Amino acid sequence: MSFRPYSLGIIAFTTAFLLWGTAVQAQATTNFAAWKDPQNAEAVHGWARLVLIRDFRNVTGTAREELLARTLSALKDIASDSNVVPSTRYNAILTVGQLLSREPIPGNPPVTPIAYSAALLYLLDVYQDPNAPDYLKYGALLGIVRHANIGIDPDLQDKVIDMLLETVTTEFEPREITLDSIPLEPAAWDWFRLTALDSLTALGTIGTNGKVVTELLSVINRQSRELEDLIESQYMLAREEWEQFRRSSELASKAAKTLGDLRYTSATDTETTDIDARRITDAFIRLTKAVCGIAHKTATDVLEPTEREGPSPNPALLLERIVVNLKMSTQSVVWGIRSGFLTGRPTEDSFYASLEPDDPSIRRLDILLAEITRLATFLDEGDGTRRPILSANVQREFQFDLSELRDVLAKTSEVLAEILREEEEDAL
């Protein structure tokens, strides 16, 4: 046999094999019917990754649009089927939130939205469906957050914002226990609200007529009132009150931080920069004062115990808990004002930078920032009279005790109360 015909035969066979392999790969789409089998529940998570990586690889144009429509239809069928294992339904709706109309270019931010807008409409429907299970709603909310991060169709943005704000501003309400559903716990609803704030952060808009700012301020002020009510209690905080304190301060701090993630100086024509700076400043001062006040009360209750039930808290553990909460809350307020950390300069798009040089709120914000700086320095270094023990084998301790912290918090609260009092007198 001649070598040339033999080699040509090899080449022809190889080419045919590669073409056949490519065709098989292009046709190897997911068998969604297998997802519904309870025995496959543990494998569905991995299959979901294949849908996104294998099925859509190098698929563009009309072919991609058709594949997106078929995939969305199959995933909707799985997520809506009450006979399917809950984990599979959850994975189905998570996959919906990750469908892309086109592949992103590495290193380049998308000029136009690349998320699949039809998927977003479905996610919104599921999230707003009163009969949908809570775990499906949360999966839908995570998908909405992803859309916010990679680009939302401008025609849908206002609808998404309204839904997110409704979630953030809605307080937890116990629901009736039924045989078909498990009631949502307060902590679980907090996850919904905090996740919605993540989506607002991704969007970065102050909203039409500044509605995002207005609603976030209402959240901060309500949580501040709850903290103030706890401060007025004559008794040491019980476990339930400690949980309320933690949840209120965490939500208020996240809302304050989200305010710092919005774009104030680059608002679009449909937005307005005519924002009530005094009201925003009041909210930041009031939240900081409330957090310091409840920390002061907690320290006082331990140092000056009254009659109470239950064991006394561990002072060292309590001190650590107070410091962590103080740092989280005050740094969130700083971010809300400057869109950056305490040691940096206000960013160009920050609330602080949006104020006119003669705005009276600047003076009040500067006083607040100075007090937070003084408190932060104390929390890190104490009053400077103690020398910290620096050793690789010795855990660094706080350079102050509960009594010293209480005194610093009292001074901070007095300064903040004076700022609020001056503003109230000027308004009369």
Image: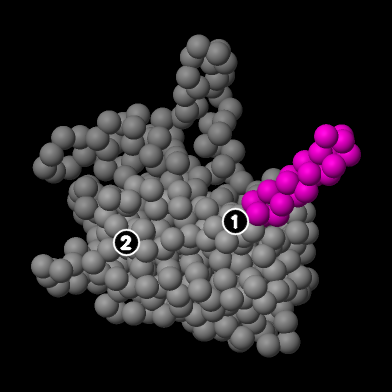
Image point (26%, 43%), residue name: 301
Magenta stretch bounds: 1-22
- Is residue 80 visible in the rendered image? The answer is yes
Residue under pointer 2: 36
Residue under pointer 1: 24
Q: Quadrant of residue 232?
A: bottom left
Instruction: Assign the magenta stretch its main secondary structure.
Output: helix
The correct choice, above or below, for 320 with respect to 161 in the image is: above
| Residue 127 image point, x, y percent | 39, 74
Circle 1 or circle 2, nearest the eye:
1
Q: Secondary structure at mark 2?
A: helix
Image point (47%, 24%), residue name: 397
Residue that sits furthest to the front in the current view: 1
Residue type, label 2:
Lys
Q: Quadrant of residue 271?
A: bottom right
Residue type, label 1:
Val
The correct choice, above or below, for 52 with respect to 100 in the image is: above
The question of residue 13 being in magenta is answered with yes
The question of residue 162 being in magenta is answered with no
